[in-house]
Image (cartoon, rainbow, N blue to C red):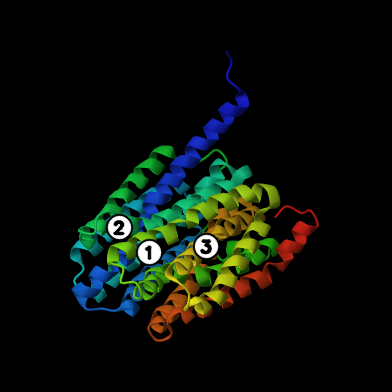
């Protein structure tokens, strides 16, 4: 009996996509590995929530510098994405291990977390380029899976801690490093897809590619929407354990419950990404991104008004927020990748990430400094991000209303 050629082709495409998203899950577990051990670090080093925010900012700052270098130098499009991804996983695992074993206080910890952030600059954006190289036609759906795995990777350290509260914080960090080494092996073996393009003629320190992509109206509108989304996203993920601590103070729940709920609230975003990717096949990426950003913006506005309500209502709203806050991210990347020239996809995604994560540093600094004084009202500090993003997305929504694919 002959095999169905359509099914066979789909299977050939699906296997690389699944391998890439698994590698992304493992590799991005580095991102918030320190936050999962926040309580232990506070006790060991006599630090507070604002100091945990500094550790997160160290990662963000390194990521910004790394993506800025990739975009300005053109390296993201000059060399094979699979090789860059692999090398950055190896460095990320090493520096994360150094954080666990060699850190003796905030200065050394921030330094190692900064180096982890630089390494992540070759994992997240290059993971997106790998996806486009294997399956450009279904980028919205495939990138939804990829960012879903990034979301689970972000939540994974919280999940590991919730399984065994007796694990030391160093052990949790080292597990993330081990997973990242597995990610390096997976992508090294897989290689680049048949649709991947490189541009070996790119010379170092040329801004032409960046200027070129920002001249494209759809890329510019998508990037602006993404920047508004990023003002909210990583600050929300940083705040989740702190918002839960405020809620659980009323019920006396232990730290294990906090870790468990942190995992679910952040990790449930993977479902939002995957469903958003499937939905984008029917209504387009722009409408999915606009809808998700609208929902998360509304939650920013109403969350401080829920203080007098019960714990389960808080948890339910946080779960919904966790779904909506990340569901738009892969769709912004899809719109941007479609809008720019094929040989500049790596550069375009890297510079979009760099600027977006630059905003997260400011946002995280503000919210972690303010939450001790204003509590749940910190959500209002995140609200300008969705408002900004929705404003600049209007042209994309107008284009879809005219039947233009965005």
Secondary structure at badge 2 equals: helix
Rendered residue at 72%/68% (across/down):
394
The percent coordinates of residue 364 (x first, y second) are: 43, 75
Residue at the (59%, 28%) spot, across then down: 7
Report the residue that reaches farthest toward the top: 1
Task: List x then y, in percent, for residue 238.
Answer: 40, 70
In-front residue for pair 404/239: 239
Q: In terms of sequence position, does the residue under pointer 3 or pointer 2 come before the other? A: 2
Residue 257 visible, this orientation? yes
Which residue sits at x=33%, y=58%? 157
- Which of the marked residues, 2 or 1, is nearer the chain's N terminus? 1
Q: Mark 3 Cα within 10 Å, few/some/many (few <14, many 20+)?
A: some
Q: Are marks 2 and 1 in contact (CB under 8 Å)?
A: no
Query: Which residue is farthest right?
Result: 402
- Above or below, 132 against 155 in this view is above
Judge the density around disc 2: few (<14), some (14-19), many (≥20) Cα neighbours within 10 Å: many
For disc 1, the neighbor class at 10 Å (few under 14, some 14 to 19, many from 20) is many
Residue hosting label 3 = 320
The span from disc 3 to disc 2 (Cα, nearest Å) is 21 Å
Whether residue 72 sits left or right of residue 48 in the image: it is right
What's the residue at 28%, 66% (across, down)? 255
For disc 2, the marked residue is: 162
Q: Secondary structure at mark 1?
A: helix
Q: For the N terminus, give its image quadrant.
A: top right
- Spatial distance from mark 3 to mark 1, Cα to Cα? 28 Å
Q: Residues under labels 2 and 1: Cα distance?
A: 25 Å
386 or 58, which is in the foreground? Answer: 386
Proximity of marks 3 and 1: CB atoms separated by less than 8 Å: no
Q: Residue 319: x and y, percent?
A: 48, 62
Q: Which residue is mark 1?
A: 117
The reply, left or right, for residue 26 in relation to residue 146 is: left
């Amino acid at each position: 009996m002959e095999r169905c050629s359509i099914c066979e082709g789909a299977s050939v495409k699906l296997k690389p996509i699944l391998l890439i998203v698994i590698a992304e899950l493992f590799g991005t577990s580095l991102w918030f590995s320190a936050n999962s051990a926040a309580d232990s670090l506070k006790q060991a080093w006599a630090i507070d929530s604002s100091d945990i925010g500094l550790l997160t900012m160290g990662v963000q700052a390194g990521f910004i510098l790394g993506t800025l270098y990739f975009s300005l130098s053109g390296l993201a499009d000059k060399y094979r994405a699979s090789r860059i991804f692999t090398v950055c996983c190896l460095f990320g695992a090493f520096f994360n291990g150094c954080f666990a074993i060699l850190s003796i206080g905030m200065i050394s910890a921030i330094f190692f977390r900064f180096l982890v952030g630089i390494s992540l600059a070759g994992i997240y954006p290059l993971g997106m380029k790998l996806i486009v190289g294997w399956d450009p036609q279904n980028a919205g759906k495939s990138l939804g899976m990829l960012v879903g795995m990034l979301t689970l990777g972000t939540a994974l350290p919280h999940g590991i801690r919730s399984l065994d509260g007796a694990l030391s914080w160093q052990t949790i960090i080292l597990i993330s490093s081990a997973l990242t080494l597995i990610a390096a092996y997976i992508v090294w073996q897989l290689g680049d897809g048949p649709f991947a393009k490189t541009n070996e003629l790119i010379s170092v320190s040329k801004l032409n590619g960046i200027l070129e992509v920002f001249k494209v109206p759809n890329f510019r509108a998508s990037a602006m929407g993404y920047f508004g989304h990023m003002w909210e996203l990583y600050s929300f993920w940083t705040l989740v354990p702190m918002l839960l601590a405020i809620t659980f103070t009323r019920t006396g729940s232990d730290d294990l419950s906090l870790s468990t709920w942190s995992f679910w609230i952040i990790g449930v975003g993977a479902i939002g990404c995957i469903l958003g990717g499937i939905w984008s096949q029917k209504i387009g990426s722009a409408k999915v991104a606009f809808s998700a950003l609208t929902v998360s913006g509304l939650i920013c506005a109403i969350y401080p008004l829920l203080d007098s309500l019960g714990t389960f209502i808080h948890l339910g709203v946080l779960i919904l927020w966790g779904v909506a806050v990340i569901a738009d991210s892969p769709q912004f990347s899809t719109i941007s990748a479609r809008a720019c020239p094929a040989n500049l996809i790596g550069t375009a995604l890297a510079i979009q990430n760099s600027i977006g994560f630059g905003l997260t540093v400011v946002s995280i600094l503000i919210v972690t400094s303010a939450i001790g004084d204003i509590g749940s009202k910190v959500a209002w500090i995140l609200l300008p991000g969705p408002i900004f993003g929705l404003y600049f997305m209007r042209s994309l929504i107008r284009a879809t209303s005219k039947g233009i694919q965005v």
